[in-house]
Amino acid sequence: MAITAAMVKELRELTGAGMMDCKKALNETDGNMDEAVEYLRKNGQAKAEKKASRIAAEGLCAVAVSGDTTAAVVEVNSETDFVAKNETFQTFVKAVAAQAVASSAADMDAFLEEAWNEDASKSVKDALVEKVAVIGENLKIRRFEKVVAENGFVSTYIHGGGRIGVIVEAKTDVVNDDVKQAIYNIAMQIAALNPKYVSRSEVSEEYIAHEKEILLAQIKNDPKESQKPEKVINGMVEGRISKELKEICLVDQVYVKAEDGKQTVGKYLEQVSKEAGASVSVNRFVRFETGEGLEKKQEDFAAEVAAQMGK
């Protein structure tokens, strides 16, 4: 397969690796992007681990709540940042969030077919099409998620004017202002540090085995580390896995407001529980970041102007 400059550029953006390393990886994997990322990781040349963390598309996230126990978060995309800042678009995104919190839809197709809350004669899809006509840009309701707390309450947080939306479902038998503030603090933590799981118990054995494979390959490809005894190498792998889990598991992360700079989120929740005389924990969380995993349209304004002028 012919390796193009665009492919090399994309792989560089995904991994942070050098241009020649990216070109070699693509040649070695016959242009398969996912395999090329794996190749670079195993060789210790990839600086970014998750291609899904690429933030590219424009738009907004919004949350809506119903009482203390129900909340929904939505992401609605636009073509340009200019439209994302438009009041008409922002109002529509809030309406979509309000629709989602009242929705019983199990997926996006069902959601789009629901009667629009602001005008039951239309569907959500109809309202979207009308908004596209008004704004003059392609818009997309990309995703939504609804959270209902059964043994506690929900807390929500919006960061960056709608760039990130978070819902936290707290499990607790005591709900007061202090507990609510603590879970709100946790929501801000999730927005800032982007954990993937609540705790290590949620991490699959397959994920851990795959990461160990990557780490072992990195060590074997290192001239110095590869010479160490097998027992030492195994200890290095376990140590690096442990470090990674501390970064991706919420309760193992260092709490961003920790006074000593060391207290974990788990220990913070234990402290909150003790002070409230209750058991306070995070049952689940949802974090949407605008444009996660989407490619941003590459604009060539000189070409666009030339085309409009008939050149």
Image (tube, rainbow, N blue to C red):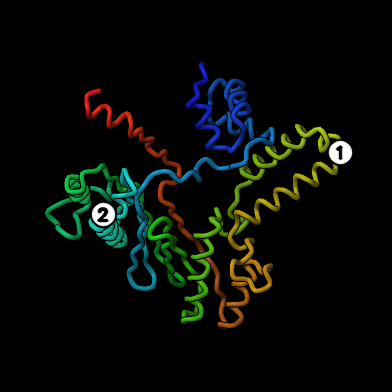
Q: Quadrant of the C terminus?
A: top left
Q: In this view, does 36 lie above or below 171?
A: above
Mark 1 or 2, closer to the camera: 2
Residue 171 image point, x, y percent: 50, 70
Q: How crowded is mark 1: few (under 14 residues within 10 Å), some or many (20 or more)?
A: few
Describe residue 176's horizontal placement relative to residue 61 as left or right. Answer: right
Q: Can residue 108 be seen in this view?
A: no
Amino acid type for the residue under numbered disc 2: Phe
Residue 243 image point, x, y percent: 69, 53
Quarter of the image holding residue 116?
Answer: bottom left
Q: Nearer the viewer, residue 304 or 224?
A: 304
Element type at mark 1: loop
Residue pointed to by mark 2: 89
Q: Residue furthest top?
A: 1
Q: In this view, does 97 lie above or below 3?
A: below
Amino acid type for the residue under numbered disc 1: Lys
Residue pointed to by mark 1: 228
* Number of numbered discs visible in the structure rendering: 2
Q: Can residue 216 be seen in this view?
A: yes
Tell me the residue at 56%/56% (across/down).
195
Residue 216 image point, x, y percent: 74, 37
Tell me the residue at 68%/72% (across/down).
260
Describe residue 234's horizontal placement relative to residue 182 as left or right. Answer: right
Label located before the other in sequence (1 or 2): 2
Cβ–Cβ under 8 Å for marks 1 and 2? no
Quarter of the image holding residue 265?
Answer: bottom right
Element type at mark 2: helix
